[in-house]
Image (cartoon, rainbow, N blue to C red):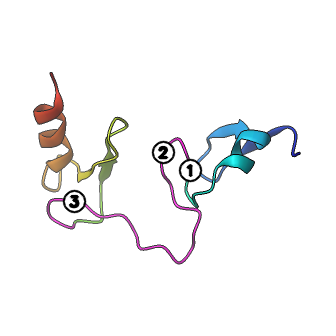
Amino acid sequence: APVGIFTSLCAHSMHCKCLAEYVAANCPVCRFSFDPTAEPSACASCGATESLWMCLICGHVGCGRNVGFHAGIHADKSNL
C-alpha cells in the first residue's frame, strides 16, 4: 500500500493510502480535475470562464462580482 503524503496540483495534501482508494479523476477536496482532456469549468448560470468561484458545500460553480455575480447570488440563496 502507498505510504506518505501526496500534494496535488491544486495544493491539497492527502494520505497516499486514502487517495489510492479514491476512484475519481479529480481532487476530493476542491474537485480540481487532474484529467488534461476535461472541459474547463464555467459558470453554471451564464457560462463565463473567468473569475469562477466554487461552493465548497455543494460544488456549484458561479462567476464573481466583476462578471455576473452568480457565485454571490448562489451564496445569498443558500445562506440559511
Label 1 residue SS: loop
Which of the two labelled residues, at mark 3 and mark 2, occupies the earlier sequence position?
2
The residue lying at 78 percent from left, 43 percent from top is 16
User: Could you say where residue 15 lies in the image, as x and y percent from the top left?
Assistant: 75, 37
Residue 37 vertical placement versus 42 (above, below): below
Disc 3 target residue? 44
Residue 41 vertical placement versus 15 (above, below): below
Query: What amino acid is found at the position of numbered circle 3 in the picture?
Result: Ala
Query: What amino acid is found at the position of numbered circle 2 in the picture?
Result: Cys
Label 3 residue SS: loop
Q: The magenta stretch spans which residues?
A: 27-47
**Left or right: 8 in relation to 60:** right
Query: What amino acid is found at the position of numbered circle 1 in the picture?
Result: Cys
**Left or right: 48 in relation to 17:** left
Which of the two labelled residues, at mark 3 and mark 1, occupies the earlier sequence position?
1
**Left or right: 56 in relation to 72:** right
- Looking at this rendering, what residue extends furthest in the bottom direction? 37
Disc 2 target residue? 30
What is the number of the mark on residue 27?
A: 1
The secondary structure making up most of the magenta span is loop
